Image: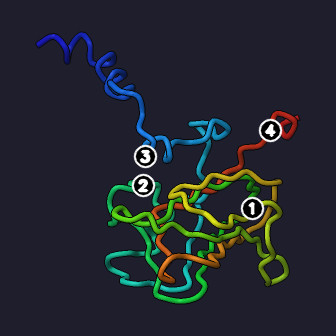
Amino acid sequence: RDVYGDYLDELKALMTEGVAPPTAKATQFARPKWLPSDAKNLALDAKVAVSSLYKKAHYPASAINDGKLDVYKNEGRWVSDEAESHWVDFEFAGETKLDAFRVASGQASAQTPLTKFRLQVERDGAFVDVENAAVENNDAAVVCLKFKPVSGKKFRLQIDETPGNLARLWEVELYRVGTPSDNK
């Protein structure tokens, strides 16, 4: 009876820690060490537009940056129509600097993650690739990548290859992680 009143914080900490070592599946979704737990996901502040929708009511574009990452359920993610290429645009109210992303894609029953994608930034009305912000031959449900800082108001996740020509995204997170030398 006294657990709730006297030991609740300790119980919460133990529940977070778990009782067994993490499985390979669990570690696949963990944040990389270079991404601080208090880093702000800038994608939450962006307006999102997509190339297409599979079923708007079931798989809305708003799921891409809602801050919910539950890769064990297929609900709560965006799914595109069948096509050869897909994209997701992130538009910010003002100039925004990014240097990292985390992309969670696929489906719960069979991985089917995005296999080839890249981040782009809009320059003079056209999208150009962000240096070192591309992924090829991917087979992981969650991909985390750091790249050289880039500023812009509008960014695009250009999806070039995906199994079955359907893009499936649980979440796209965009960050400005920086380095100590960036803060001088």
The amino acid type found where label 1 is placed reads Ala
- CA neighbours of label 1 inside 10 A, class few (<14), some (14 to 19), many (20+): some
Which amino acid is tagged 4? Thr
Report which residue position mark 2 lands on.
68
Using the numbered discs, state the Cα–Cα distance from disc 4 to disc 1 in whole angstroms. 17 Å
Q: Residue at x 85, y 81 (%)?
A: 124
Q: Earlier in the sequence, mark 3 or mark 4?
A: 3
What element does badge 3 sit on?
Answer: helix
- Assess disc 4: are there few (<14), some (14-19) or many (≥20) residues with their C-alpha within 10 Å of its C-alpha: few
> Which is nearer the N-term, disc 2 or disc 3?
3
Badge 2 vs badge 3, beta-carbon distance below 8 Å: no
Comes first in the chain, label 4 or label 1: 1
Secondary structure beneath dot 4 equals loop
Q: Residue at x 27, y 18 (%)?
A: 8
Based on the displayed image, in which of its 4 quarters is residue 45 positioned?
bottom right
Q: Which residue is mark 3?
A: 25
Q: Is residue 153 above or below residue 30?
A: below
Residue at the spot x=78%, y=54% of the render?
147
Residue 87: x percent and y percent?
61, 79
**Residue 89, position as x, y percentages in the image:** 62, 75
Give the residue at mark 4: 179
Amino acid type for the residue under numbered disc 3: Lys
Mark-to-mark CA distance, 1 and 3? 25 Å
The residue pinned by badge 1 equals 133
Front residue (pair 12, 151)? 12
